[in-house]
Image: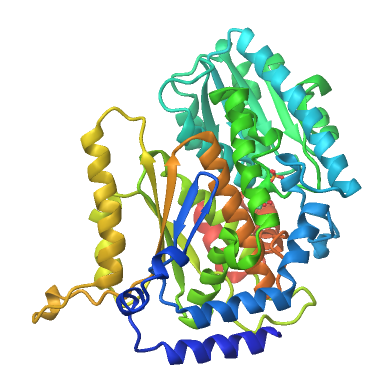
Amino acid sequence: MSGAALKEQLAAHARRLAGTRIADLVGGDPARVADFSVQAGPLHACFARQRIDRDALEALFVAFDQAGAAPAIAALFDGGQVNPTEARPALHTALRSDLSEATVARDASAVAREARTRMAALVERICAAGITDVVSVGIGGSDLGPRLVVDALAGDASATGIRVHFLSNVDGAAAQRVLAGLDPSHTAAVLISKSFGTQETLLNGAILRDWLGDDTRLYAVTANTDRAQAAFGIPEDRILPMWDWVGGRYSLWSAVGLPIALAVGMPAFEQLLAGASEMDAHVLRTPVRRNMAAWHAALAVWNRNALGLASHAVVPYDERLKLLPAYLQQLVMESLGKSATLDGRAVPMDTVPVWWGGVGTDTQHSFFQALHQGTQVVPIDFIGAVHSDAPYADNHRALLANLLAQSEALANGQDADDPHRAYAGNRPNTLWLLEALTPRSLGALLAMYEHSVYLQALLWGINPFDQFGVELGKQVAGRLLPALEGQGEADDPVTRALVERLRD
Ligand code: F6P
């Protein structure tokens, strides 16, 4: 089915369902809650509160069948050229699972295992060297995943005795803040950059090198060993590899996860990979109609293209997942923020909405007013953990009560004579439950989002693995740096006036 035909079909279903409320869909179909729930390993998803019925959902699953979802998923795992604009595979699954028989995937898994062995040795070496703090320097995919996982799993007491800090922004205030209070003689720095050509990381890396005053505590993770050696003189035994067959935003499972292993220990890092691998097996082996990632992707496309919803919120009811929205903004929006199809034509429908969010219950007291009564309907992924290892049981029950309440209130609404006090309801949301927040369940959750992104891209006919959209800004900034330093002038009249003002 062409994109245009899918768009038309979804629009027809949306017209048919225009007057149907989520509460009616749930009330009129006793099997809906069970049939619209999917379990995969430690993750449970309840999709019953989406504004869609069985027929419309079936149209999306048929679209998956016609787009070749099963062979496309197999191609991802087998190392097919799923990133055609850069003529590469995207083998992040090979970093954590060994589910493919294809030689290229087997080779990738073997290389990844070898890198993990070196990584474990490096973690031991750093732990044994009396290091108390490690600063991880990287940005985008070389920062957001490790930052999220460390924040989620390391807690206050790190398993290794090492405190891990993150430095990404080129703003000097970021470096100043991170370094304040650290002792250079007990600190190591890990420079993480797939390209080793990223301005922010090179500048911050140089700050760290100078601040440490001793380059024997400088480590790197990169696909460009030559540049790491040339620019920072880091010897090969302190460099862990990356490969062009892993995209930056899909790389936390590789040696890019070194900060994770340094914070939570190698066994917990392996558990994270095991959780992701469980999700990989589920996604690879389960037909789309029972496949968790396919449900998530189908509903994302439904909300965007049939209901025309222009943003999507992620609200974890778990303090430790407060960085999840920021991580997903890169994963989803850098992957799906495209308007050209694989063969270079304009995508006939809208692609990625704006992803955003924040942690519950805090955000109930900030943006939830707009979610309940604003004019824009925002579909939400609510995420909670059944069990908590935090000490205050009453708080956990209150947290879960709020999670359940918000999902219900947004879907069902409440009538009132006074329009100021009325809740329209009918606001779609999915409820995700993790058994507990563990390395395994977190690995599974993140892998689910990766696979959903891949399947959304399949329905939109776009490449989720390139990111040419970020290049233009970098090029212009590169041209403007000399102008700010007083050499030459900016071409653009507006920028020229602003540069003059800054120079003054
Ligand atoms: O934001 C653009 C980007 O290329 C991301 O895709 C990538 O994760 C990030 O920059 C960092 O790149 P590198 O790891 O090469 O420093």
Instruction: Residue at 55% x, 85% y: name it.
Output: 10
- Whether residue 220 appears in this view of the structure is yes
Q: Is residue 40 above or below residue 287?
A: above
Position of residue 30 measured from the top left corner of the image (x, y, whole percent): 36, 72
Q: Quadrant of residue 199?
A: top right
| Direction from residue 189 to residue 45 in the image, left or right | left
Q: Is residue 503 above or below residue 33?
A: above
Q: Decide which of 402, 344 is in the foreground and name it.
A: 402
Instruction: Residue at 47% x, 48% y: name it.
Output: 324
Position of residue 16 measured from the top left corner of the image (x, y, whole percent): 44, 91
Report the number of numbered marks.
Answer: 0
Position of residue 51 measured from the top left corner of the image (x, y, whole percent): 41, 76
- Whether residue 170 appears in this view of the structure is no
Instruction: Residue at 73% x, 40% y: name it.
Output: 95
Looking at the rendered image, the quarter that the N terminus falls into is bottom right
Q: Quadrant of residue 288?
A: bottom right
Q: Is residue 221 above or below residue 64?
A: above
Q: Residue furthest right?
A: 103
| Direction from residue 300 to residue 24 in the image, left or right | left
